[in-house]
């Protein structure tokens, strides 16, 4: 019965995904995520997380935690973004209890907190003065709060920015302004595009958190959005057609080959390896581009996300650690989450891995650490500036009936976004037309919007 109630809170497509993944994961669920082993009461915590540099650093440093907490074993399951969302949604929605700690986004936290799927972390955090919950950056703390309760804590926060190779631009005689327009970026990308180096790399991989993360912000700054104030879908409109058409032309003229196979990690690699000159994406990428082992360290420039009709077009996002109510290791899970999002963890990353690798956008105090200020001077100020400048209540030209920038804060959006992203990806890959993609997406979006009309 609990599983049925949980499933009803999801959109139709998400229910199908949850049921399918739960069925496919039955063996793992039976094995249990958090367990007390037979070796003297060892507690095993299973953490589901996304495959990016910041999270992999946490996995490397887990031995520090285990050494300081004898009897605790922390196992990581690292997945690509789309796979993570499917697996975690399935587990949390069904109450299967496969994971003790999950990595979720700003999109999921308030909805899942409202559904009663996540442990309220407020009492544990507020009662621990050393954790200093008020030090969490207000924008990312707010997006993880529902009804005054904190249901997840930010591991790192981000907006989106334009990143470009200064050496390439200087050689071409191009100056990128701090607040560029999309047309300026498109012109620059075309000038530096060569057979061996794309002028710009942009996400094209299907997925609401892949392709549609940057593309939604492009749509918004071009004057479009998913819905109007009355939850009428506005996908099949001139604004969407202009924005999506611009995105394809940008990729056709100056983008990477086979863009539908590119998302965050692929573009990051392309920029590091000199196979792309520019990239508009998550600001957290800057810390990886400036890492000690990065081939482009010190060669990068950073600017605000390009715009068309709006003053800003960056997104607001955080990857957060949350604890499903289905865990059997609640206290141990809370203790690990506190450690991984603490001031001490920030310093541990700086001292053990490098100060440019410190998770950004999570704590105010991070930006006062001298070593971090020096290591992150190229990108930390602009990251804070953009995060403080975006407006999640109205990121586009017109008002919207939800709070959020690169996503719509309704349960159905995960399914809507995934279906529409596949349609647009087919258009990007010349497997369909823009009119057909937007027309079908309009119907998909309207079906979801109808459920939220007053």
Image (cartoon, rainbow, N blue to C red):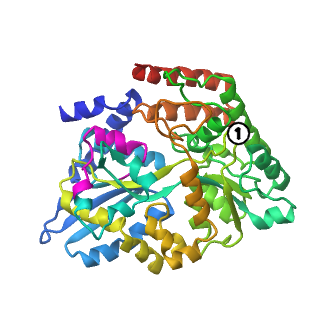
Image: 210 above or below 192? above
Image: 411 above or below 82? above
Where in the figure is residue 444, as x and y percent of width and height? 51, 23
Where in the figure is residue 436, as x and y percent of width and height? 64, 22
At horizontal 75% and vertical 43% (from top left) the residue drawn is 250
At horizontal 28% and vertical 53% (from top left) the residue drawn is 323
Question: Residue 328 lies in magenta, yes or no?
Answer: no
Q: Which residues make up the magenta segment? A: 103-123
Q: Hey, which quadrant is residue 194 in on the image?
A: bottom right
Where in the figure is residue 239, as x and y percent of width and height? 68, 28
Classify mark 1: residues with Cα within 10 Å, few (<14), some (14-19) or many (20+). many
Quarter of the N terminus within the rendering: top left
Please say whether residue 194 is visible from this viewpoint. no
Q: Is residue 134 left or right of residue 182?
A: left
Where in the figure is residue 128, as x and y percent of width and height? 24, 66
Question: Total number of numbered labels?
Answer: 1
Q: Hey, which quadrant is residue 311 in on the image?
A: top right
Query: Which sits in the foreground, 169 or 344?
Result: 344
Secondary structure under badge 1?
A: helix
Please say whether residue 345 is visible from this viewpoint. yes
Q: Is residue 289 left or right of residue 67?
A: right
Query: Which sits in the foreground, 279 or 315?
Result: 315
At horizontal 61% and vertical 21% (from top left) the residue drawn is 439
At horizontal 54% and vertical 43% (from top left) the residue drawn is 391
Q: Is residue 48 left or right of residue 178?
A: left
Quarter of the C terminus within the rendering: top left
Residue closest to the far right: 173
Image: 388 above or below 422? below
The residue that mark 1 highlights is 247
Question: Residue 109 lies in magenta, yes or no?
Answer: yes
């Amino acid at each position: 019965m609990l599983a049925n109630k949980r499933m009803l809170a999801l959109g139709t497509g998400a229910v199908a995904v949850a049921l399918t993944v739960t069925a496919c994961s039955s063996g793992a669920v039976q094995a249990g995520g958090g367990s007390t082993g037979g070796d003297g009461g060892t507690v095993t915590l299973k953490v589901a997380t996304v495959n990016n540099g910041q999270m992999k650093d946490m996995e490397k440093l887990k031995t520090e935690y285990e050494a300081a907490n004898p009897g605790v074993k922390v196992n990581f399951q690292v997945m690509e973004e789309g796979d993570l969302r499917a697996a975690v949604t399935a587990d949390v929605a069904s109450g299967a209890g496969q994971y003790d700690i999950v990595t979720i986004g700003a999109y999921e936290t308030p909805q899942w907190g409202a559904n009663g799927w996540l442990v309220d972390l407020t009492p544990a955090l507020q009662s621990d003065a050393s954790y200093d919950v008020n030090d969490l950056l207000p924008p990312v703390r707010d997006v993880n709060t529902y009804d005054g309760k904190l249901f997840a804590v930010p591991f790192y926060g981000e907006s989106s920015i334009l990143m470009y190779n200064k050496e390439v631009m200087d050689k071409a005689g191009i100056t990128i302004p701090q607040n560029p327009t999309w047309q300026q970026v498109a012109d620059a990308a075309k000038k530096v595009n060569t057979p061996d180096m794309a002028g710009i790399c942009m996400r094209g991989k299907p997925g609401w958190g892949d392709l549609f993360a940057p593309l939604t912000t492009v749509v918004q700054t071009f004057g479009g959005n998913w819905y109007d104030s009355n939850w009428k879908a506005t996908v099949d409109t001139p604004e969407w057609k202009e924005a999506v058409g611009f995105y394809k032309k940008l990729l056709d003229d100056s983008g990477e080959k086979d863009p539908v196979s590119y998302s965050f990690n692929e573009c990051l690699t392309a920029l590091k390896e000199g196979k792309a000159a520019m990239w508009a994406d998550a600001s957290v990428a800057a810390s990886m581009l400036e890492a000690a082992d990065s081939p482009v360290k010190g060669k990068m420039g950073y600017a605000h996300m390009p715009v068309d009709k709006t003053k800003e077009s960056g997104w607001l996002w955080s990857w957060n650690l949350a604890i499903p109510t289905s865990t059997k290791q609640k206290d141990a899970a809370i203790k690990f989450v506190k450690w991984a999002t603490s001031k001490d963890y920030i310093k541990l990353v700086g001292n053990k891995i490098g100060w440019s690798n410190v998770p950004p956008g999570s704590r105010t105090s991070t930006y006062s650490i001298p070593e971090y200020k020096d290591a992150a001077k190229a990108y930390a100020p602009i990251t804070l500036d953009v995060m403080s400048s975006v407006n999640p209540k109205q990121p586009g030209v017109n008002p919207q009936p939800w709070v959020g920038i690169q996503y719509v804060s309704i349960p159905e959006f995960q399914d809507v976004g995934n279906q529409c992203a596949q349609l647009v990806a087919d258009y990007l890959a010349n497997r369909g037309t823009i009119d057909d993609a937007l027309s079908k997406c309009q119907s998909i979006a309207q079906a979801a919007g109808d459920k939220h009309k007053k």
